[in-house]
Image: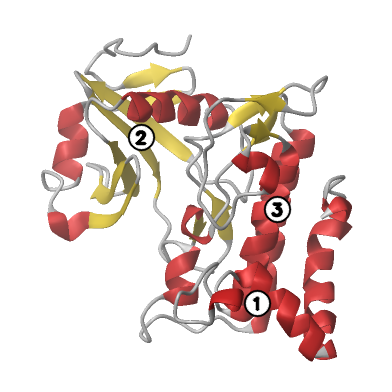
Amino acid sequence: MLVKYGELLPTETRSFKGCRVFSYKELKDATAEFHEDNKLGKGGFGVVYKGTLSDGSEVAIKYLSQGSKQGNEEFMNELASIIAIQHKNLVKLKGCCIHGEERLIVYEYLENKSLDLSLFGTSTMRVLDWKTRYNIALGIARGLEYHHEQSEPRIVHRDIKAGNILLNKDFHPKISDFGLARFLPYDQSCIETERMAGTMGYLSPEAMKGHITEKADVFSFGVLLLEIISGMKKNDTRLQIDTQYIVDWVKISLDLSPYVMFLLTNLLLIAMNLGFPTTRGR
């Protein structure tokens, strides 16, 4: 049984469909009352905090926006998407909490935080060498392969981006944030929706039209690969207008240098070698 919108779970900690249910007090204590110093980041649906549970284990706690219909939807999608799946390149769910209008999701804590901080963060962040970048790209591809080929039903993430890739202490990547994810039955290749979802710059043409398909994830992964290879963000307004979007920048660079083609070809083969049926069409 999956909890329905607005349904209040018991406040005591117990097992719930393989998902530990935390009390609000536990998570409040773990984060020193959601103190600013424990804030890891902020997204469209809420804030993520670092917490230390009573047993000493460290976790990441996503505090969804209070009273938000989208927050409720994200909460349900996230639990439904990852409560029963296990893969080394997918972030592990530790539990959840519903307290009145409050919605919280608890994940494993990953020491090196999100990929965007390593790629685009301050000079104090570790510079990623080529072997590390390759392994990060390979891990993300394996996680997506699991979504698209091994999960039953298949899962379309719909928001693959640098900010949703978390890195552990060894810089192994894990896909996170399944709030926009949708299940894709094996007898369907596409689901139509009235609402566009995702992050501009990573969205495929069909995703911008509300079409939910595995190809949308593959397109987003391609943009992310370009960021990993180049160290550039998906868009940079400091550049000339015809090269501000990384895909346009690559097109122009390919015309100027055959080395760029060699580099891109070898790294893009990561996805193709993993057997994504949609990659070759990209």
Rendered residue at 79%/22% (across/down): 188
Query: Residue 179 versus residue 80: which sits nearer the camera?
Result: 179
Of badges 1 and 3, the one in the foreground is 1
Mark-to-mark CA distance, 1 and 3: 16 Å
- Upstream in the sequence, badge 2 or badge 3? 2
Question: For the residue carrying disc 2, how many other residues have a C-alpha within 10 Å: few (<14), some (14-19), or many (20+)?
Answer: many
User: What is the CA distance from the residue labelled 2 to the residue labelled 1?
Assistant: 38 Å
Q: Amino acid at mark 2?
A: Ile
* Quarter holding residue 272: bottom right
Q: Nearer the viewer, residue 153 or 241?
A: 241
Tally of numbered discs: 3
| Residue 195 drawn above or below residue 33 | above
Q: Is residue 199 visible?
A: yes
Report the residue marked by disc 3.
219
Q: Quadrant of residue 246?
A: bottom right
Q: Residue at x 66, y 82 (%)?
A: 130
Give the spatial CA distance, label 2 vs label 3: 28 Å
Q: Position of residue 151 (x, y in %)?
A: 72, 31
The quarter in which the C terminus is drawn is bottom right
Foreground label between 2 and 1: 1
Crowding around mark 3 (Cα neighbors within 10 Å: few <14, some 14 to 19, many 20+) is: many
Could you tell whether 143 is left or right of 262 in the image? left
Q: Is residue 67 left or right of residue 172?
A: left
The disc placed on residue 105 is: 2
Tag 2, which secondary structure?
A: strand
Label 1 secondary element: helix
Under mark 3, the amino acid is Phe
